[in-house]
């Protein structure tokens, strides 16, 4: 939309539900600028999270400086914990919740690995009047 004073987050599960525009943007990310597909979040549907930013909120734009991207490896967070019975059927038979399993069997999680196909960060060109 025309008001870009917000952060939107998206979760696409299963991965086959990734919007066509986003899939095209990822697929063309390493091509020359004139061959890339620009991401269009307005075409991706309802976001998982929407965080307004600006003077009319409790979150001024000045909070967003020198930011870092963090990959949260929460085993039992609100997204992963809700999938526990599907993703960990063997453990779900023995432990009622993901948290119960982690507390009872931490040695099973001493080493964990993820296969990450890519991390794509799209940011708008900065305009000093936004602050």
Image (tube, rainbow, N blue to C red):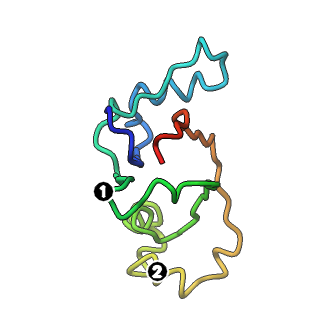
Within 10 Å of disc 2 (Cα), the crowding (few <14, some 14-19, many 20+) is some
In this rendered view, identify the residue nearer to me: 55 or 93. Answer: 55
How many marks the image carries: the answer is 2
Q: Which residue is mark 2?
A: 99
Which percent across, then down, holds residue 127?
52, 36
Query: On screen, 52 above or below 34?
Result: below
Q: Is residue 13 visible?
A: no
Q: Is residue 91 visible?
A: yes
Residue appearing at x 37%, y 37% in the figure: 17
Residue appearing at x 40%, y 78% in the figure: 97
- Under circle 2, the secondary element is helix
- Under circle 1, the secondary element is loop
Residue appearing at x 68%, y 59% in the figure: 113
Q: Residue furthest top?
A: 34
Q: Nearer the viewer, mark 2 or mark 1?
A: 1
Within 10 Å of disc 1 (Cα), the crowding (few <14, some 14-19, many 20+) is few
In the image, which disc is placed on residue 56?
1
């Amino acid at each position: 939309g025309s008001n870009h004073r917000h952060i939107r987050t998206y979760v696409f599960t299963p991965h086959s539900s990734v919007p066509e525009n986003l899939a095209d943007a990822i697929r063309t990310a390493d091509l020359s600028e004139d061959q890339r597909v620009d991401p269009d979040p307005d075409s991706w549907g309802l976001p998982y999270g929407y965080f307004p930013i600006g003077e009319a909120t409790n979150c001024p734009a000045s909070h967003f400086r020198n930011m870092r991207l963090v990959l949260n490896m929460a085993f039992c967070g609100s997204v992963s914990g809700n999938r526990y019975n599907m993703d960990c059927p063997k453990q779900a038979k023995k432990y009622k919740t993901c948290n119960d399993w982690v507390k009872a069997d931490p040695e099973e999680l001493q080493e964990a690995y993820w296969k990450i196909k890519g991390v794509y960060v799209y940011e708008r060109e900065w305009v000093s009047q936004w602050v």
